[in-house]
Amino acid sequence: MSSLTIRRWLVKPFIFFTIIFILKSFLAWGVIFGDLLSWKSIITEIPFVWALFCLIEAFASKRKLGYYMLVNLLVTAIFFAAIMYFKYYGVIVTYHAAEQVNQVTAVRNSVFSLMDPYYLLIFADIILLGVYFFFNKKGRDHKKENINRRTGASKFSYSLLFAVSFGLCLFNILPNKASMNEIKKAQEMGLLNYEAYTIFAQDKPELVKASEITQDVINQVKGIDTAAVSPFQGTAKGKNLIIIQLESFQSFLLGLTIDGKEITPNLNSLMKESLYFPNFYQMVGQGNTSDAEFVVNSSFYIPPQGAATMSYVDKELPSLPRLLQANGYQTATFHTNDVEFWNRGELYSALGWEHYYDHKFFGNEDTFFFGASDEVLYRKTADKLKEMEGDGKPFYAQVISMSAHHPFTIPAEKYQMKLPERYEGTFVGDYVRSQNYADYAFGQFVEELKANGLWDNSLIMVYGDHMGLPIYSLDHDDKQLMEEIHGHEYGYADMLNIPLIIHEQGSLTPQTLEQVGGEVDIMPTAASLLGVPMADTIHFGQDITAQTYNLLPQRYYLPTGSFIASSALLIPGNSFEDNTQYTLAAGGKSPAGTEDEYTRALRLRQLSDSYVTQLPDKAPDKE
């Protein structure tokens, strides 16, 4: 196309920018929906931008091109944010994400490690046009003489086209409002229409009266067998509780060998000496690690929007720290990052922790990613735990590891293994190597606990906080490596599968238990093993050493209505009827999630949201 032809097209910015946005919508849809040349993207996205263009043409008598460029920049930013957010979280970004923009900025290295260079093509026209029209004399003259002139089309014509475009937007939005699956909803509405819809839609769920939410009601909805008693109940009575949360640790790592090299030898050894739950699953949301801390210590589900650390920290939460303090325990949590990251200071206050130890305690020794290494974390924590034991009371300590954090590029001096050539330079390879280091550091913690006498006098619970390898973040080579590791195509059940290991020296007979569990179950399971009653504490988990059936509503990383039950992982489509089901990671059962389970999972989320929302506000923190 000659420069003269281009300049003729540029006289008509409405047409020119329409073509630009068709190309940009192809790029965004190709990344998010896997549909690169989708005609649907044209009929859903273009009416939205046409409506904006009509407003410019009808009302802008000056600086018309400037307004077009502004719209171009804003809409392009929305497309790019949707692409990057989907690659990191696997969901469609909404305005709610702006509430956590400072936290997302803090993990920008993780986010941009997922960016393919061709994503930046979405900004190419902005750069080229900006240079041509604003920094080039010929471009400035062309703009002044041609583009900013009024065209022959009347305001009436643009008003009519605006009405048609607005009508098409409503036609795309209204029939799809009831869809349960947010990804399908965005695909049917169009990304831009979906973003507008989420701003204006009423998303406040109906609350159930707090007086109507009892443990009996929750147990009935969950399908709990209230007559079942754990064979391990009270086996760790009076002992310390140490809960270790492993960063980004997925179940497939346990027992994994690559070309004869054992990846997690220390955790493998512990697994063989403990209760091990291979069908255990994450239940976090946008807050990831901090959400795991919330769910584990409260036995509630994450909030409908945003992270628990932003939504629920103004409440006085019933919690494991408060429960154990009422039974004579002292409590402390350990994390090498600054306590203000993900608003943890407020979270810890809401959960009732007596003490927290963060960056101020661990310092800058041997730092990478967000704080001191796991080696420093475990060494200093072990010393502090020994000091706490000297106070004469049992303690509950939660230890949050962090060195194996996304994007998993640990310093070379921390390598504990040599990767096979096919793993070098891959996302999966970096992940495996970082978790090999995390296991090495964990092994040091075990030895320190044994050396200072705490190992034999403590109940140890170890779990992964959330996935490390999202399906939507993997390229072709990574997916092939994951298929090699699993022996089948890497799926959603594999992705959400995290381990739970429970160790108590002397009373717990080592065994693998196949029942399904999730992070919400850790609090009631720990209380049962410690012989601490929970009759007066509302909770949505269950003692998984006593129950054979479970129902785990999922949120955020899966569409609304998704759940994991003892039978399957189920993801609804526009409704339950067009659902997709997946065999559980370690159960081997054929998928058979039912509509009754789907309804009960939605009810459980409503009950949890309602109960937490109506809890009393916490007292102001003392200075």
Image (cartoon, rainbow, N blue to C red):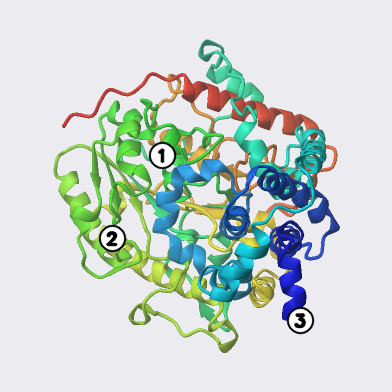
- Spatial CA distance of label 1 from label 2 is 25 Å
Secondary structure under the numbered disc 3 in the rendered image: loop
- Crowd around label 1: few <14 · some 14–19 · many ≥20 (10 Å): many
- Crowd around label 3: few <14 · some 14–19 · many ≥20 (10 Å): few
Say whether marks 1 and 3 touch (CB < 8 Å): no
Q: Is residue 452 shown to the viewer in this render? A: no
Question: Residue shown at 47%/75% (left/top)?
Answer: 433
Counting from the top left corner in percent of width and height, residue 286 is at: 51, 47
Dot label at residue 378: 2
The extreme top residue here reads 211
User: How many numbered marks does the figure carry?
Assistant: 3
The extreme bottom residue here reads 421
- Residue type at mark 1 is Thr
Q: Decide which of 47, 323 is in the foreground and name it.
A: 47
Question: Residue shown at 56%/12% (left/top)?
Answer: 212
Foreground mark, 1 or 2?
1
Counting from the top left corner in percent of width and height, residue 150 is at: 70, 52
Counting from the top left corner in percent of width and height, residue 401 is at: 37, 58
Q: Is residue 18 shown to the viewer in this render? A: yes
The residue that mark 1 highlights is 309
> On screen, 332 above or below 528?
below
Is 270 displayed left or right of 301 in the figure?
A: left
User: Which quarter of the figure has residue 136?
Assistant: bottom right
The residue that mark 3 highlights is 2
User: Which quarter of the figure has residue 198?
Assistant: top right
- Residue type at mark 3 is Ser
* First in residue order: circle 2 vs circle 3: 3
Question: Residue shown at 38%/18% (left/top)?
Answer: 616
Question: Residue shown at 79%/62% (left/top)?
Answer: 35
- Crowd around label 2: few <14 · some 14–19 · many ≥20 (10 Å): many
